[in-house]
Image (cartoon, helix red, strand yellow):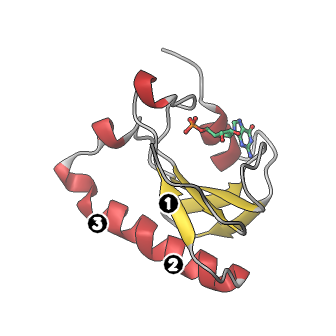
Amino acid sequence: MAGKTIFKQIIDREAPAKIVYEDEQCLAFEDIHPAAPTHLIVIPKKEIVSVDGIEPEDEALIGHLFVAIRKIVAKLGVTGGYRVVTNCGPDSGQMVMHLHFHVLAGRKLGRLG
Ligand code: 5GP
């Protein structure tokens, strides 16, 4: 079996991270290579590889993550909008095989594509 992903290590407090939010189901921390003034990573504590690994039983969890994102951006005082992005699979450039949502804010974000 492959070793723990870096995000699982952060969940287990085996790797450091600047955690900005945590509850029983999810964790949010600052991206180590920020692409915007605010760049957070929001992850479920449950190990799910990507959107492709989401099962019907995870429906409530995925909703929970988006409610958490709303709480986090409100707590951080983000104004002017933000972007939520998730990469899934090789063509997307996904590097960490643990479902995560990037939350980007603090500058004008270019159009996608
Ligand atoms: P992906 O390309 O998989 O969607 O994005 C993975 C993100 O995780 C990247 O933006 C990368 O900068 C971030 N990242 C990778 N390793 C670490 C780490 O050890 N700590 C933190 N805080 N972020 C990381």
Counting other residues with Cα less than 10 Å from the Cα at mark 2, is it few (<14), some (14-19), or many (20 or more)? few
Q: Three-letter amino acid code at disc 2? A: Arg
Q: Between residues 63 and 92, which one lies in front from this camera angle?
A: 92
Q: Which residue is mark 1?
A: 84
Instruction: Establish if 60 lies above or below 29.
Output: below
Q: Three-letter amino acid code at disc 1? A: Val
Counting other residues with Cα less than 10 Å from the Cα at mark 1, is it few (<14), some (14-19), or many (20 or more)? some
Residue 100 at x, y percent in the picture:
51, 48
The secondary structure type at the circle numbered 3 is: helix
Q: Between residues 4 and 32, which one lies in front from this camera angle?
A: 32
Among the two numbered marks 2 and 1 on one chain, the one whose residue lies closer to the N terminus: 2
Q: Which mark, residue 111?
A: none
**Ligand 1 sits in which quadrant?**
top right
Residue 101 at x, y percent in the picture:
51, 53
Asked if the residue under mark 2 is in contact with the one under mark 3, i.e. CB atoms within 8 Å, the reply is: no
Q: How far is mark 3 from mark 2, CA to CA?
A: 16 Å
**On the picture, is 68 further left or further right than 54?**
right
Q: Between residues 68 and 101, which one lies in front from this camera angle?
A: 101
* Viewer-side label of 1, 3: 1
Q: Between residues 64 and 30, which one lies in front from this camera angle?
A: 30
Q: Which residue shows up at 28% across the image and 45% down it?
A: 54
Q: Which residue shows up at 61% across the image and 60% down it?
A: 109
Residue 53 at x, y percent in the picture:
31, 37
* Viewer-side label of 3, 2: 2
Among the two numbered marks 3 and 2 on one chain, the one whose residue lies closer to the N terminus: 3
Q: Which residue is mark 3?
A: 60
What quarter of the picture does the C terminus occupy? top left
Instruction: Establish if 74 lies above or below 65.
Output: below
Q: Three-letter amino acid code at disc 3? A: Ala
Q: Which mark, residue 70?
A: 2
